[in-house]
Image (spheres, rainbow, N blue to C red):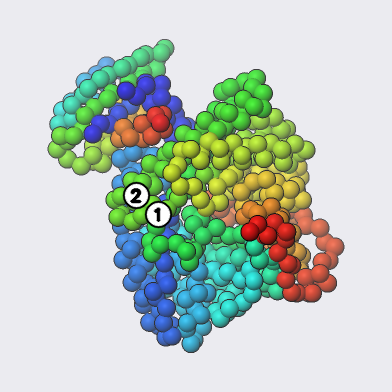
Amino acid sequence: MINHNDILETITMIQEENLDIRTITMGISLLDCCHSDIDVVCDKIYNKITTYAKDLVKTGEQIEKEFGIPIINKRISVTPIAMILAACENKDAVKIALTLEKAAVTCGVNFIGGFSALVQKGFAHGDRELIEAIPEALAVTEHVCSSVNIGSTKTGINMDAVKLMGETVVKAAERTKDNNCIGPAKLVVFCNAPEDNPFMAGAFHGAGEPDCVINVGVSGPGVVRAALAKSKGLDLTQVADLIKRTAFKITRMGQLVGTEASKRLGVPFGIVDLSLAPTPAVGDSVAYILEEIGLDCCGCPGTTAALAMLNDAVKKGGVMASSHVGGLSGAFIPVSEDAGMIAAARNGCLRLEKLEAMTAVCSVGLDMIVIPGDTSAATISAIIADEAAIGMVNSKTTAVRVIPAIGKNVGDELEFGGLLGSGPVMPVNTASPEKFINRGGRIPAPMQSLKN
Amino acid sequence: MRAVISVIGKDAVGILAAVSAKCSDYNINVLEVTQSVLQDMFVMVMMTDISAINADFASFVDEMDALGKEKNLSIRAMHEDIFNAMHNI
């Protein structure tokens, strides 16, 4: 029998502490849409997506209603488009982006991810064409998200791709300067990109995945913070235990919703991404959890240690709650999407260098960070290289999603709205890494890659 | 198949009666009711059997939500699996 208090606890989590399922993401393989004629490819892509995902939003809404748990996003991820483009004679990638947009609108999803290329070891046919099309593709579409994997522990870092991506980020911002530079907010540069990630903007459907799959991303920073706020005087062992217990409960929601969605849609269930994903809503912030643990302001000394503990406890609690764990799994620290991070960045306590250190111990990387509009492409490339190096050496996923605010400088802000939030322009070290970036070539795979 | 109906809000006459009447309309059997009144705050949790429900469960959820709004209370009907998943291993 269910305990009365347990029922009220669940209801409080949903009603007052912003517990939700962040996303149900349907991964769809487009490998069978390859053709030498791009118009045929576009037709096949549109038909496949709109057939497979036609009931995705409706099913999500039904589950939401029957179980009483909000499911914020319903999304689609597809095979990296560069792979499909490889077979086309006319490599007009923007045409495929527009097809993805049309399919997303037809299905009613919030985002569609997979305008992607995997170039960690070099460029194959279609890769360069796709990357060059990213700024235009992100400007002419609203729902399409893009990602590029430029490094991995096994392969090292493709520095030619790093250079290209620095330039691409700047171009994407310039191309959307009249729309809050929204382009680069939909573009992630990865090292060790996971192939089953349900979160945007980095979701794509990896080549090793089945034809169609359902992945779920959970959320719940507000619940963790509230649990900590209610329990005074705990030492850090007890704090870690409390976070584990809370993460377990949050993840069980994800497992339930994922299994249910997979059953109703007749699609295999892939993974639950054990994540603490913040939203700009007050109280739903990872920074506030760190402050609840005892930091005066996120970004002060102690932040990395507190985040390391939080990240580890989330995984330990979540892993037993789910039959298959994957994706990014860990605490997210997107600056513009987290009320506490925004406040800490505004008052100068949280800086880029501290965020970089934090990315070594948590999920993802430098995420949703607004930087001055005059930041050079070489500097952005070097930021990408630094992040990728952390990921490569530590055998973890790292990523960069920085937004150059064209025409703006430190003290100004960009307002994206919705889940993407708003971000103050953060200062960037202006000494030039240009010579380093212009060398090109590859950073060899580290010793950590030699595990066989 | 069972569902939990929770009612939270300011105490008033006839809350239990109104919720029970709706359950009866939908052919939902009430299995157990616990309620407490703390100062003015009314909390009621109702365990119900929805196996013989005569309509879509989603429409019952909407109906409960509407009843809550009408009476200025928070009334939620939720499938019991969510509580089992969260609190039982």
Query: Which numbered disc covers residue A230?
Result: none
> Where is residue A291 drawn, in percent x and y?
67, 33
Query: Which numbered disc covers residue A261?
Result: 2
Disc 1 marks which residue?
Answer: A214
User: Would you say the residues marked 2 and 1 are in contact, meaning their CB atoms lie under 8 Å apart?
Assistant: yes
Q: Could you tell which of marks 2 and 1 lies nearer the N-terminus?
A: 1
> Where is residue B87 drawn, in percent x and y?
41, 29
- Between residue A274 and residue B57, name the one nearer to us: A274
Q: Quadrant of residue B1?
A: top left
Label 2 CA crowd tier, 10 Å (few <14, some 14–19, many 20+): many
Q: Residue at x 36, y 54 (%)?
A: A268
- Residue at disc 2, secondary structure: helix
User: What's the distance in space between the residues labelled 2 and 1, CA to CA?
Assistant: 8 Å
Q: Residue at x 73, y 32 (%)?
A: A296
Q: Is residue A193 above or below residue A314?
A: below
- Residue at disc 1, secondary structure: strand
Q: Quadrant of residue A338?
A: top right
